[in-house]
Image (cartoon, coloured by chain):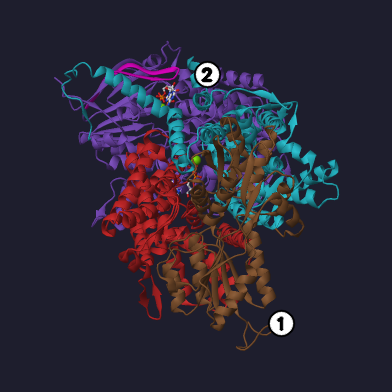
Amino acid sequence: SGGGSGSADKGSGHKLVVGFSQVGAESGWRTANTKSVQDAAKKAGIELKFSDAQQKQENQIKAIRSFIQQKVDVIAFSPVVESGWDTVLKEAKDAHIPVILTDRAVDSKDESLYVSFLGSDFVEEGKKAGDWLVKEYAAATGDVNVVQLEGTTGSAPANDRKSGFADAVKGQPKFKVVASQTGDFTRAKGKEVMQAFLKSQPKIDVLYAHNDDMALGAIQAIEEAGKKPGTDIKIVSVDGVKDAFTAMSQGKINYDVECNPLLGDQLMDLAKKVKAGESVPRRIKTEEGTFTPEQATAALPNRQY
Amino acid sequence: MRQQPVLEVRGIRKEFPGVVALDGVDFRLFPGEVHALMGENGAGKSTLIKVLTGVYQADGGEVVLAGERVRVAGPLQAQQAGISTVYQEVNLCPNLSVAENVFIGREPRRFGLIDWAAMRRRAAELVRELDLDIDVSAPLNSYSIAVQQLVAIVRAVDVSAKVLILDEPTSSLDRDEVRRLFAVMRRLRDQGVAILFVSHFLDQVYEICDRMTVLRNGRLEGEYRTGELGQVELVSRMIGAELAGLDQLGGGKRRERTARTGEAFLRADRLTRRGAVEPYDLDIRPGEVIGLAGLLGSGRTEAARLLFGADQSDGGTLRIEGAVTALRGPRDAIAHGIAFCSENRKTEGLVGELTVRENIVLALQAARGWLRPLSRTAQDAYALKWIRALDIRPGNPEALVRNLSGGNQQKVLLARWLITDPKLLILDEPTRGIDIGAKAEIQKLVANLAEDGMAVLFISAELEEVLRLSHRIGVLRDHRMVAQLDNDGELTPERVMATIASGAHA
Amino acid sequence: MKAVTRSRLFWPAAVLAVLLVANLAFTPDFFAVHVRGGHLYGSLIDILHFGAPLILVALGMTLVIATGGIDLSVGSTVAISGALACLHISESADPGGLATLLGALGIALGTALLLGAVNGLLVAKAGVQPIIATLILMVAGRGVAQLITDGQIITVTSDPYKMIGGGYWLTMPFAILLSAAVVLATVLLTRSTALGLLLESVGGNPVASRLVGIRATRLVALVYVFSALCAALAGLMVSSNVSAADGNNAGLWIELDAILAVVLGGTSLNGGRFSLGGTVLGALIIQTLSTTVYTIGIPPETTLVFKAFVVIAVCLIQSPAFRAKLAARGTRTRRTTRPHAAAPTNREVGA
Amino acid sequence: MNANALLTRLRGQIPLLVTAVLLVSMFSVGSAQYDGFFSGQVVLNLLIDNAFLLVVAVGMTFVVLTGGIDLSVGAVVALSTMVSAWLVEQHGWPPLLVIPLVLLMGTAGGWLMGWIIHVFEIQPFIVTLAGMFLARGLCYTISVESISITDPQYTAMAQTRIPLGDLFVSPSALIALLVVAAGFVVLHHTRLGRNVYALGGSEQSALLMGLPVQRTKTAVYAISGFCSALGGVLLTFYMLSGYGLHAVGLELDAIAAVVIGGTLLTGGSGYLLGTLLGVLVLGLIQTVISFQGTLSSWWTRIVIGALLFVFIVLQRLITARRP
Ligand SMILES: Nc1ncnc2c1ncn2[C@@H]1O[C@H](COP(=O)(O)OP(=O)(O)OP(=O)(O)O)[C@@H](O)[C@H]1O
Ligand SMILES: Nc1ncnc2c1ncn2[C@@H]1O[C@H](COP(=O)(O)OP(=O)(O)OP(=O)(O)O)[C@@H](O)[C@H]1O
Ligand SMILES: [Mg+2]
Ligand SMILES: [Mg+2]
């Protein structure tokens, strides 16, 4: 490395090298996340070693090992799962390479294995969705029948968004989750499952989808059943992708909890600071909001992904 | 008072969907005898053997082994009980070496591990006993069907069992091999082994067997001493009708042959393939039957395969109807009106899962191309015609070929090529496993086809058959065409044998 | 009666019927089909509708399997064709136009033709084992689909395109009609020409097939092309149904479902005899199973356990060996009610 | 034995040699291309990182040699990690009890599948697919979350590094090599092994030759089940966690490794050492990708496919050209 357009090089005289191990490319959200990291690195003049794990933890471990082998300055990665990182992180620590987690935490007991965690909190997202529901139906007296479209069984966002939501509505027996199935985070499955729900459930008031894609699929199913999404069935979802905002502006989604993939700039800043030896907070939350249809309509033109 | 039979079955019944293969058959096998099981194709011989060895479970009746009633659960148990079997279709593992095929399941071991060196050494010895000169560490499928049959025999014989069952072991062997096999059988018999022998060659049966049991249509016809029953009478017991004369058994006089002249349909000039057959010349005129004679492994099959494009020649030229032709594959050959009926019906011939009808029309259909399907009526007509002509049993065109008896499968294969109405018909061991009645029919058929102008290349291990049909005979030895003899009426099997032995032009 | 039960389609059909009836117990109006908004509406329609792409993919797979091969790349082909079509439509000036639609179809099917040809050449000409040959495209193809969509979901709004997978014609979902037409065409193609026989021959005994002069190379290559075309059509259907192309997830694991459908339909993975009707039934069994899971509310955590037991039960019922053993057990237990016949010895040889 | 026999047997090994040579060339190209690639540790890491795959692929080789297929391996691996983590962490069972138990469970599961396949004559594809569903499903019924393992004995296994000069290997890598050696001996020097080949050559013949077909078939699936469970144990050492989504798609990797190694999917022909090479090929492709380090997600897949393509086609061309 070195040379080239290295105008950003300061002090040490060689470009900062960051190794980033991404989970995979399983969704548009993830791709936006990848892109943001890559663009930010370019902008900050940082050499990025990028590796895609294709949803496999073992591939991520391999990638981190190879980063250590290549003696990068900082390692950043989005863990596929929370557990099972101690060994390889210890190796990184032994090689004096600081590690930053993005998007998801690890459950390691040894706090010294990573310097900072930057990203969203899936449980929090589920909670926000639940809170909105509680508020929306504060006045309602009868049962509120909720159907849930879960993410890929066993995946962290699915687990966490489910439990966060459940926590938020726990105290209120009127909220009944009458059906809950996995839609694998995809539109096609979301549509298929919703279609079955519409036939097997006599009364559905609310749909809670673990991501926008499933919600968008479900909307089509609802429309084909001759009902009005957003009116006959209220919809709350997570992610905040552009298509969902469009749907919101048409009144088809009632509430969307943002899960921001654009943490590239923050990550690069963090990497520079860590390399420079500055102290950084252990937990940095990405800037995430929640959107009502009005807010979404306003934000739609600037939405990047 | 005779001694107790080692193996006895009483009232055995075996039914397959739509067919009663065995119906109340009794059968006894005594130590120290060679016992022939006789019957037409589809009479139930192989089925009886499979019931005896536990491949099939009988639907009724009982098996008594050394005086005890038993239920033979499977071939493994049969083997453990001292019954060693060579089944009709070669049932060895083509991917394993010859040595392994001989020893698998009872490999010599040292410290719990297979002793490969000992295994190869002993296999080589055993194989040499039958005068086979083959590399025992080569995979079995690099050898011809005849060699494979011998390997199966070697395996069965070496088990040194109380009972040895041989289901048509000689169907592709030549005289010498048969002689050596009989020597081994006699030795075993003298040691007290009971041998069950199935063959459609009556001469062989009369030569080696002490007694015989005749089956007809799955029923027991009777049990006889070989001396008690003449050949003619035996045949009439087998087919259940009086025979006009021995002449019809196929042992009869040779057919009149008018020598053919004119343009050769096919002419091979120094045609060769490295490692398979040395350069040879051959021409076949329409209406001519050319026989190929030679010992096992002499290269007859391989010479024939070159004429069909089944293997690529790497030297010499082939002319078809005068024009030099390079056959790129069987498809080319078929397009030129050549048909090749392989000696190995199981691996190179039939598609077991398809029906008799489909197997019969397959070659014709392939030649027409997929866009011009034979109508179902046409298919049925072909199938029924040849089922009748060759007496294929069961006569149901929708039966799966896999379920047919060996001889009937062979007839299906023949029918497949006959309906393509070829100009040159290559028949490699076409009468393998076919009963004598049908054999005579087939020989007559071949002669008639030639009479009508078809050229025929006829390969058979049975020299008499070759002599009976051919106008000329090419003699092969060690992959070389050593002579071409005119079958002028004076040619005798002995002279052909002598030519083979001397390897010189006669 | 016996002739009916012996038919190859009897057991798959029986299984399907049992599954459907089981649903009735949980959802009383499961079999009800209404007309709503001019469309047929009901669970049975849904099963056919969502099963349509699987039927298509499994159809192509059947022919591949008949030749003794296997095609793992169908899932990627599904993704690629949907992605290409949606990309073309989304970039065109007139997304709702018929010309655009035809262009999209042409690009998608044309590409599939190419992909199938690559598979076919690898298998038939180069002699690579089918599972590996198609694994290459399975891995790379998913990447290509992502490359086309840039990893995002391409949403399109095109009424004619929507028609393929999500539209209705004569009150029926068009997808059902389309796949029915393809099934019919395939049946005609294989059974009223000699294609079926030749394929079965190649799969049943390749050596013998060569010796009877069947053009096995060409036939095998063509079968992979056909499979890719079916997959591409399925891909169009899937993406059209949701009006979006998802390069990441479209057709994920559909190859397993398709193979399962073929096998449930009674076609052996070893090649040879194949049954298109069986495959259709197999695909419907799988789709009904999913629908059953949704409608009777099996929690996602136990869905797979449930599926495992259903699949095994289905296979056992279909297995002649199992039925024979069951029947034998039945007669034996009935017999044991009287004391054992005092046969002197009835031991198993060498047991 | 004469020279001719030696030659024929050597000729049988040619595909294996070709694969090995291609593997070495791929490694050389990688070394020339990337800094730090040409090191012993990269080679050893191939073993360390793919130990569990190697073990699973050994089991798969047995199955494929009989002409069968085992789709359940990935799920059994996941179930093994899950059961280990669950028992050790949430029930406090000692690892020395848990590991044999898990191995037994895998073996029994495999045995059961083999038994069903043989006795009821159902195609292996479906039976093992059902096994896959069942094993994955059982994972989720234990927990949908991942369970991390903090047990000191597991962490010790995970972090132990056995030095080899300047380099090191993990105990798991050694275990995997041991399994390969054991598999080799069983396949090539015991009756069971030869019966496996015979079964793959022709099941009907094997039956008629009086070979213990049922025993062999169930044994083969039991071995595969055992190897999967052992692979799962090694994976727990590697990941220190149990998770229902571990090893998704591993069955395809294992089958690919076996087939790349020259084993025919139709059975009866192939080598265990080929499987070792196959695993190394897959691992090396992965390593090249990670050293490349600039590929976006989709290019990663495309390049993996392309490398696989080049490898397979070269392998075919070279082996096909010999006389
Ligand atoms: N598995 C099977 N299924 C159905 N029918 C069968 C099966 N095996 C044999 N048969 C039928 O049983 C009858 C007896 O066949 P078998 O093989 O015993 O004859 P064979 O006497 O050995 O004849 P060949 O001389 O031709 O070998 C035949 O009609 C055959 O079609
Ligand atoms: N001593 C031997 N006996 C038999 N076959 C042998 C022997 N030595 C070598 N072989 C091989 O067996 C193969 C048989 O060749 P081929 O099939 O052409 O013979 P064939 O004359 O048709 O004899 P048959 O068909 O009667 O076995 C050849 O490849 C030959 O090399
Ligand atoms: Mg017979
Ligand atoms: Mg021959």
Q: Say above or below: A296 vs B61.
A: below
Can residue B339 be seen here?
Answer: no
In the picture, the disc for residue A5 is 1
Q: Residues within 10 Å of mark 2 (few under 14, many from 20)?
A: some
- Chain bearing tag 2 is B
In the picture, the disc for residue B396 is 2
- Would you say the beta carbon of the disc 1 residue lies within 8 angstroms of ligand 2? no
* B140 and C60: which is toward the camera: C60
Looking at numbered disc 1 in the image, what kind of residue is underneath it? Ser
Which image quarter holds the C terminus of chain D?
A: bottom right
Residue B7 included in the magenta stretch of the image: yes
The x and y percentages for residue B96 are 40, 49
What color was chain D assigned in the picture? red
Residue B109 included in the magenta stretch of the image: no
The x and y percentages for residue A9 are 66, 85
Q: CA distance from mark 1 to mark 2?
A: 83 Å
- Looking at the rendering, the stretch of residues picked out in magenta corresponds to B6-27
Looking at numbered disc 2 in the image, what kind of residue is underneath it? Asn
Residue extending furthest toward the left: B1
Task: Kindly indicate whether the residue at mark 2 contacts the one at mark 1 (C-beta within 8 angstroms).
Answer: no
Q: Helix, strand or loop at disc 1?
A: loop
Residue shown at the point (37%, 53%) measured from the top left: D229
Which image quarter holds the N terminus of chain D?
A: bottom left
What color was chain B assigned in the picture? purple
Can residue D80 be seen here?
Answer: yes
> Majority secondary structure of the magenta segment?
strand
Which chain is represented by cyan in the image?
A: C
Query: Which of pointers 1 and 2 indicates the residue nearer the eye?
Result: 1
What color was chain A assigned in the picture? brown
